[in-house]
Image (cartoon, rainbow, N blue to C red):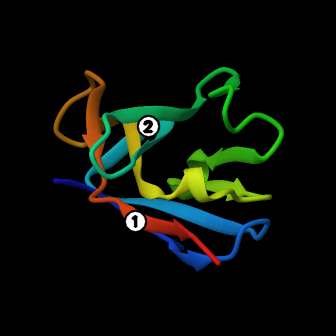
Amino acid sequence: QVQLVESGGGLVQPGGSLRLSCAASGSIGHIYVMRWYRQAPGKQRDLVAHSGDSTTYADSVKGRFTSARYNAKNTGYLQMNNLKPEDTAVYYCNVWATSVQSSTPAQYWGKGTLVTVSS
């Protein structure tokens, strides 16, 4: 079994910063792609950052968010600066990775971490 656990969410004032972490454990193999999604109440889940051969960001977070991943440690981060109330959402880590059981990459999701931006 592959487990993804996000951490680092919480309450922050507008203009503040948070750093989310994603840790993969269990039978994880090689991570090819790591993505961060977010879902605000009553809205669809949207892609925030994609880290594969290159890293891309949603227009709404460009210049404020930075994604990094460290395959050797099976971890990734989403540094979020200058947070705005509209960034309030549950943030999910998603990876395409192999496992001990299969060399065919599959998609795995974490359970999410809540980020609330409010004064």
Give the label, 2 or 1, closer to the camera.
Answer: 1
Q: Identify which residue, 113 or 108, lies in the foreground.
A: 113
Q: Total number of numbered labels?
A: 2
Residue type, mark 1 in image: Thr
The 10 Å Cα crowd at callout 2, few under 14, some 14 to 19, many 20 or more, is some
Which residue: 73% across, 46% down? 65
Mark carried by residue 30: 2
Which residue: 57% across, 46% down? 71
Question: Which of the two labelled residues, at mark 2 and mark 1, occupies the earlier sequence position?
Answer: 2
Q: Say which element carries label 2.
A: strand
Q: Is residue 44 above or below residue 52?
A: below
Q: Could you tell whether 103 is left or right of 39 in the image?
A: left
Q: Identify which residue, 20 or 97, lies in the foreground.
A: 20
Q: Is residue 9 above or below residue 69?
A: below
Q: Could you tell whether 11 is left or right of 80 in the image?
A: left
Position of residue 19 measured from the top left corner of the image (x, y, whole percent)? 66, 66
State the image quarter where residue 37 is shown: top left
Residue type, mark 2 in image: His
Position of residue 101 measured from the top left corner of the image (x, y, whole percent)? 16, 39
Q: Could you tell whether 20 is left or right of 26 in the image?
A: right
Alpha carbons under labels 2 and 1: distance apart: 23 Å
* Residue that label 1 marks: 113
**Do the residues under discs 2 and 1 have CB atoms within 8 angstroms?**
no
Q: Is residue 89 above or below residue 57?
A: below
State the image quarter where residue 104 is shown: top left
Q: Quadrant of the C terminus?
A: bottom right
Q: Say which element carries label 1.
A: strand
